[in-house]
Image (tube, grey):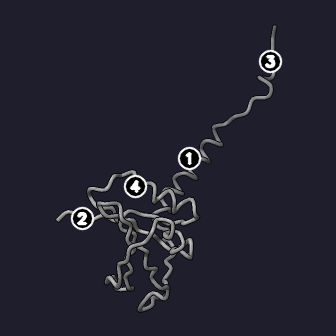
């Protein structure tokens, strides 16, 4: 059975010109791409940031599982440290966006720290972290 007529094959598309055009475009883009300079944005500068630094609430768990609240000023100096009952800790955090740092003594069971973290999270405190001392 014959599929072609006497004049030649039917419905053939010659793709050679399309490949040639694509190769020429590729070369043009490769040559011009390094020459294009990206736009540079110059941002305005200020002397100091206007947003106030949030001072975290520090909760300290001592070796005998006593809970202390440590208050610091914006410079990081300790202002006061007072004992607190476990039920009062959540009442200290008035704004859920205020960061809370938990500092546990080296000899405190990990379970006590996790219970406190879980209690704070369940009351809606969004930012709870652990305070550590870097090695010297």
Q: Is residue 15 left or right of residue 24?
A: right
Nearer-the-camera pick, 33 or 15: 33
User: Which image quarter: residue 126?
Assistant: bottom right
Q: Which residue is mark 4?
A: 112
Q: Horizontal and vertical percent for residue 53?
A: 44, 82
Q: Which residue is mark 2?
A: 134
- What residue is at 45 percent from the left and 59 percent from the top? 116
Distance (Cα) linking label 1 and label 4: 68 Å
Mark 1 and mark 4 lie on one chain; the one further toward the N terminus is: 1
Q: Nearer the viewer, mark 1 or mark 4?
A: 4
- What residue is at 34 percent from the left and 85 percent from the top? 79
Question: Mark 2 falls on what kind of element?
Answer: loop
Question: Mark 1 falls on what kind of element?
Answer: helix
Labelled disc at residue 2:
none
Distance (Cα) linking label 3 and label 2: 83 Å
Contact between labelled residues 2 and 1, with CB atoms less than 8 Å apart: no
- What residue is at 37 percent from the left and 71 percent from the top? 68
Distance (Cα) linking label 3 and label 1: 32 Å
Nearer-the-camera pick, 65 or 133: 65
């Amino acid at each position: 059975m014959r599929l072609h007529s006497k004049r030649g094959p039917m419905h053939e598309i010659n793709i050679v010109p399309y490949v040639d055009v694509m190769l020429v475009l590729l070369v043009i883009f490769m040559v011009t791409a390094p020459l294009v300079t990206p736009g540079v944005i110059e941002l305005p500068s200020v002397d100091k940031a206007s947003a106030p630094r949030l001072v975290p609430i520090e909760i300290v768990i001592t070796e005998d599982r006593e809970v202390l609240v440590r208050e610091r000023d914006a410079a990081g100096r300790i202002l006061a440290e007072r004992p607190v009952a476990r039920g009062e800790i959540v009442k200290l955090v008035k704004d859920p966006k205020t960061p809370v740092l938990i500092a546990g003594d080296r000899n405190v069971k990990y379970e006590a720290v996790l219970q406190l973290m879980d209690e704070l999270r369940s009351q809606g405190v969004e930012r709870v972290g652990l305070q550590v001392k870097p090695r010297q």
